[in-house]
Amino acid sequence: MPFPHARKRLAIGLSLALSSVSSLLAAETAQSAAPDATGSDPRSGDKAEPSAGTAVSHRGPRGKRGPRGARGPQGATGATGLRGVTGATGAAGTTGATGATGSIGAQGATGATGATGASGATGDPGATGATGATGATGATGATGPTGATGATGPSSFGFASASNSSDVVILDGDQVPFTILGANSGIVIFAPPSLFTVTQAGSYRIDYVVTVGNTGGSFAINVNGVEVPGSRFGSDAGNTSIPGQVILDLAAGDIVELVNRSGHIVDVDSGNGDTNVAASLVFERLD
């Protein structure tokens, strides 16, 4: 029940008030019932007749109120009065100062998982990761269909050879003669007995072999009348074959020849037999 102490105090106050009112009423009643000095009964309004030989006195004016008497002892607690009407709600008091923060309570149970939110915007691409290890080689695929035949490219091979059935004497500085043109893909044009004109520019490999008689000798490749460095090969021994080789760049129209650079006359000998090759010259285009 709200405000028990306030109700108790209210009841005690009402009891004291009622006790005081009762005491006042009792005193008034007693005073009214008492005859005044003349013997008259104030309640009836009759005045008593003075007795013979009694001096008649009139009631004088009320005297001044005497001083307040000492407070009497507290009366007994009266009976609890009826509950009064509930008073109006008082105005809200000012908000008190914020109390100190309490200690953190125990963690509550995990709530149920909420609904999945909408997808966020796509972030910027991350940095490229390190290259992974090379995977195992896959199985060999089936062979595809054969492609169409490509256009025929330029030939890169030419060949010329010479043979004789008797000795050929070559002076120092003269060209080695060739009498038979072998296979030729068109990269050179042979002008007998010793000149070869290049038809396609490119890098070439030129191989030669010359068989000499009793004296040794040396030979070199000339291009446009000038000896090519690194193309001279020879031997001091007689009755031997002298091989030579050089790789060089040639332009279309260059004239190539094999020249005696022995410093003396050389006897080119095919050896025994009418079909033995005494000298050969091979052109091979490399690009």
Image (cartoon, rainbow, N blue to C red):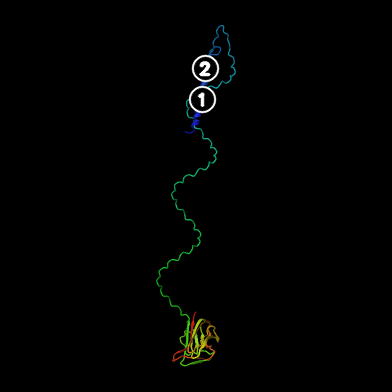
Per the image, the residue denoted by label 2 is 30
Residue type marked 1: Leu
Mark 2: give few (<14), some (14-19) or many (20+) Cα within 10 Å: few
In the image, residue 6 lies at what x, y percent? 50, 31
In the image, residue 31 lies at what x, y percent? 53, 17
Residue type marked 2: Ala
Residue that sits furthest to the left in the current view: 142
- Residue 53 lies, with reference to residue 137, above or below; the image says above
Q: Residue at x 50, y 27 (%)?
A: 12
Quarter location, residue 143: bottom left
Q: Distance from label 1 to label 2 (Cα)?
A: 22 Å
Per the image, the residue denoted by label 1 is 16
Q: Left or right: where does residue 3 sit relative to residue 57?
A: left
Front-most of 209 and 67? 209
Mark 1: give few (<14), some (14-19) or many (20+) Cα within 10 Å: some
In the image, residue 272 lies at what x, y percent? 44, 91
In the image, residue 286 lies at what x, y percent? 49, 80
Q: Residue at x 52, y 21 (%)?
A: 23
Residue that sits furthest to the top in the current view: 53
Front-most of 232 and 42? 232
Q: Secondary structure at mark 1?
A: helix
- Foreground mark, 1 or 2, reads 1
Q: How many marks?
A: 2
Q: Secondary structure at mark 2?
A: helix
Residue 257 visible in the picture: no
Q: Residue at x 51, y 25 (%)?
A: 16
Residue 16 visible in the picture: yes
Disc ID at residue 63: none
Mark 1 and mark 2 lie on one chain; the one further toward the N terminus is 1
